[in-house]
Amino acid sequence: MPWVITKLCRDCVDQSCVEVCPVDCIYGYAGEASDVPNQLFINPEECIDCGVCEPECPWEAVYEDERVPEVFSDDVASNARVADEQDSFAVPEVDEKDKPSEDQIKANKEKWNLND
Ligand code: SF4
Ligand code: SF4
């Protein structure tokens, strides 16, 4: 089953996931539409289910599709959009390291009521 990047990723500039994905199936949106959030997406047709990206993500934004929290259920479809509209997505260039702090990560999850 493919993995899914959720809204916890929004505005991330770290992109550690892109660096480790062995099949380059993590994409950013490169099209003209204004309704696509600033996050990355996994092409479910290319993901080989290795799970390598999940522990690399400092924001804990990556889930197996069966384990995506209900609050992010629409992200399964937003990731699948990559396969449907491949010309509008591109693997991003990773040229910057900007690791978030633990407080930033916690605050990002609190927005979705995911902290204990
Ligand atoms: S490392 Fe995590 S938060 Fe950053 S771009 Fe990848 S999935 Fe998004
Ligand atoms: S699970 Fe593996 S193949 Fe799928 S996006 Fe993550 S690193 Fe890439």
Image (cartoon, grey):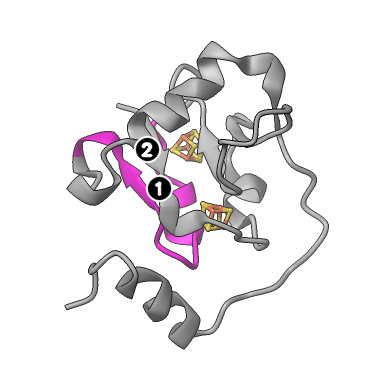
Q: Is residue 107 above or below residue 37?
A: below
99 part of magenta stretch? no
The residue at 55%/23% (across/down) is 82
- The image quadrant where one finds the N terminus is top left
For residue 75, what is the image quadrant?
top left
Residue type, mark 2 in image: Asp
Q: Are marks 1 and 2 in contact (CB under 8 Å)?
A: yes
Alpha-carbon span between mark 1 and mark 2: 6 Å
- Single out the residue that lies furthest toward the front: 34
Density class for disc 2 (Cα within 10 Å; few <14, some 14-19, many ≥20) is some
Residue receiving disc 2: 75
The residue at 74%/68% (across/down) is 97
The location of residue 113, given as percent across then percent down, is 23, 69
Q: Which stretch is magenta?
A: 48-66
The residue at 23%/75% (across/down) is 115
Residue receiving disc 1: 6
Residue type, mark 1 in image: Thr
Per the image, label 2 sits on a secondary structure element best described as helix
- The image quadrant where one finds the C terminus is bottom left
The location of residue 24, given as percent across then percent down, is 64, 32
